[in-house]
Amino acid sequence: MTELINLQVFERWLQIAAVMLVGGGIVAGLAMRRQYRGLLKGLLVAGLGPLLYLMWIFYRWMVRYDPAHDYVGLHCVSVFIINVVVFVIVGAMLGFIMSRIFGSGLQPSYSKKERDSR
């Protein structure tokens, strides 16, 4: 029985997705450059491609199998904890940055006095 997908196929598609994010982010940023923070938004999306691939390389290195040094990353609780901490920190930082650049999309609520003065 053959696998539906193997590591090489996944990594190749991940590389393609990373390149497409870079290209799409740059094109979108240039197209939206006249809008508020349009270029910055596009560059942020473009930066997600390399970050995605770097995070994959980090994860793969952490869970590697190295028989020469008797190391199996998937069997270590410390590897799991490090992965969780790194991915949570990177995700929180990205969320914070994206919320600052893209905004929350929510309209600010005004008091009755402020609404009447507008």
Image (spheres, rainbow, N blue to C red):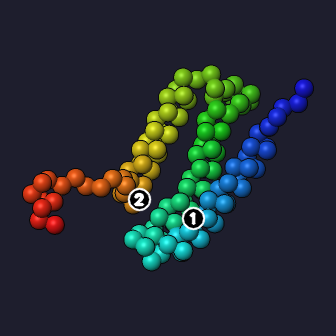
What residue do we see at 42% from left, 55% from top?
98
Q: CA distance from mark 2 to mark 1?
A: 14 Å
Q: Position of residue 21 (x, y in %)?
A: 62, 59
Q: Residue furthest front?
A: 116
Q: Circle 1 is placed at which residue position?
A: 25
Q: Position of residue 67 (x, y in %)?
A: 74, 28
Local packing at callout 1 (Cα closer than 10 Å; few below 14, some 14-19, many 20+) is: many
Q: Quadrant of residue 64?
A: top right
SS at circle 2: helix
What residue do we see at 53% from left, 60% from top?
45
Q: Is 94 placed above or below 46 here?
A: above
For residue 45, the mark is: none
In front of the other: 75 or 14:
14
Amino acid on which disc 1 is placed? Gly
Amino acid on which disc 2 is placed? Phe
Q: Circle 2 is placed at which residue position?
A: 102
What residue do we see at 56% from left, 68% from top?
28
SS at circle 1: helix
Q: Position of residue 83 (x, y in %)?
A: 53, 34
